[in-house]
Image (cartoon, grey):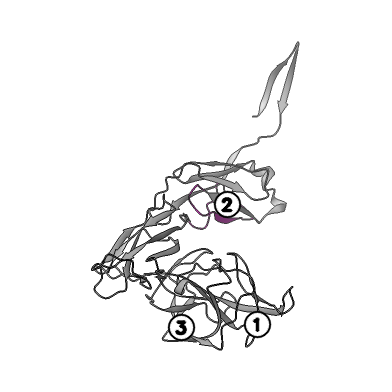
Amino acid sequence: MTGTYQVDAGNDVYTVVSDTTTYYWAVITGVATDEILGTLNAPGFAVEVQNRTDLGTKALPSGLYAITGYPSQAFPPSSLPCNVSYVLSAPGYRDFRVTVTVPTSPVFPISPPAVAPMRLLPIRIQGCVLSSTTGLPVAGALILSIDDPSSPPTVHTNALRAPVCFDHQSGKPVQAATITPVGAALPLAQPVTGGDQALILTSDAGLAVNSVVQLSSGGGVRQEYGIVAALGPGAVPGTYQVSLTAPLNYSYPVTGTTVTAVTVTLTGAPASLSSDANVGDGVFLASQLFNQAVVIESGAAAEEIRMLGAITGADGYYGLDGMGRVQEIFLQANSGSNPIADWYIEYDLSVNVVDFSV
């Protein structure tokens, strides 16, 4: 507001002369989308600016948003260039972090470098495999993600037996591997709880830093790999602590769990990730479809070893955690001529049930 004007205050009248002009603007504007569906429809969609109390936010369920403020106060010339970091969030989606650079001579509003794709939270797919002749549960059946048989894609959906523990950038290498046990089993001295990053064993024979250990229970229903980061004595005499480079996804009891040192041999030509993968993803998108063990980012700090597919237990039940990134997934039990489940993932349900008959 500029010029001269009067203000009534109680019984007094004041004449005010304004010599400055201030504007409250949208300084950053953008739009978020649904990674799979494109258009976002997310009641509760919100924007939170990091460490900037002088900036406000506005957001619509359609994904349109604005960060607001007084430009002259929030971005004085002496502070430029600078970065503004903020988080986009919505119920049922992963948080998406964005950083926008405000240049030396900004023209407001500024747009982020790219449209922000909101990623739906992954779900669990589980079910039972029954024999088509006897109707009884089938133990040890392998459930694999396969390509659409009617229209083979260029980007392949690979379902893992255990979700990844690190973020992996698009384009990183992923390669098939052969897993070979080495030496005798190394018994657990105490149970493992999902999230643990250390094993307490009664022996660490044959292990060294960078050794790979396989944990397996229920006939392979739960199976994952850890890379040794450090070795040391356990708190109880006669036990050994084996620290790992990443936490484990699942819990393993002392009885019924096999811990074995293994060697990992890369086979075939490397493929590449077609999209980034996040911690907790049980699916990765790649330039190749795999059907065995894989190594993601071989030789890198983010190296992970994972088995493909799920195994049914003695009761015929299987589970795939961290399923996401795609709208449609094709699953098959024991490959061959068995029926293919063409499944549209229902992200509003935390558990999707897909049964098979073989």
Identify the residue at image location x=74%, y=13%: 10
Which label lies toward us, 2 or 1? 1
Seen from the viewer's position, the closer of residues 22 and 177 is 177
Extreme residue toward the top, this view: 11
In the image, is 325 to the left or to the right of 249? left
Q: Amino acid at mark 1?
A: Ser
Q: Residue at x 64, y 41 (%)?
A: 70
Give the overall secondary structure of the magenta segment: loop
Identify the residue position indicated by label 1 in the image: 203
Task: Mark 2 or mark 1: name the one nearer the start of the chain.
Answer: 2
Please give the range of residues in magenta. Answer: 90-114
- Within-10-Å neighbours for mark 2: few <14, some 14–19, many 20+: some
For mark 2, what is the residue? 87
Is 191 on the left or on the right of 127, as rendered? right
Left/right placement of residue 152 relative to residue 167 reads left
Q: Secondary structure at mark 3?
A: strand
* Type of amino acid under label 2: Val
Q: Which residue is denoted by mark 3 in the rendering?
A: 177
**How far apart, in angstroms, are the residues tagged by discs 2 and 3?**
38 Å
Give whichever of 54, 111 is nearer the camera. 54
User: Mark 2 vs mark 3: which is more N-terminal?
Assistant: 2
Rendering coords of residue 191 (x, y %): 61, 69
Residue drawn at (31%, 69%) of the image: 332
135 vs 173: above or below: above
Q: Position of residue 296 (x, y in %)?
A: 50, 76
Asked if residue 98 is among those painted magenta in the image, a careful observer would answer: yes
Tag 1 secondary structure: loop
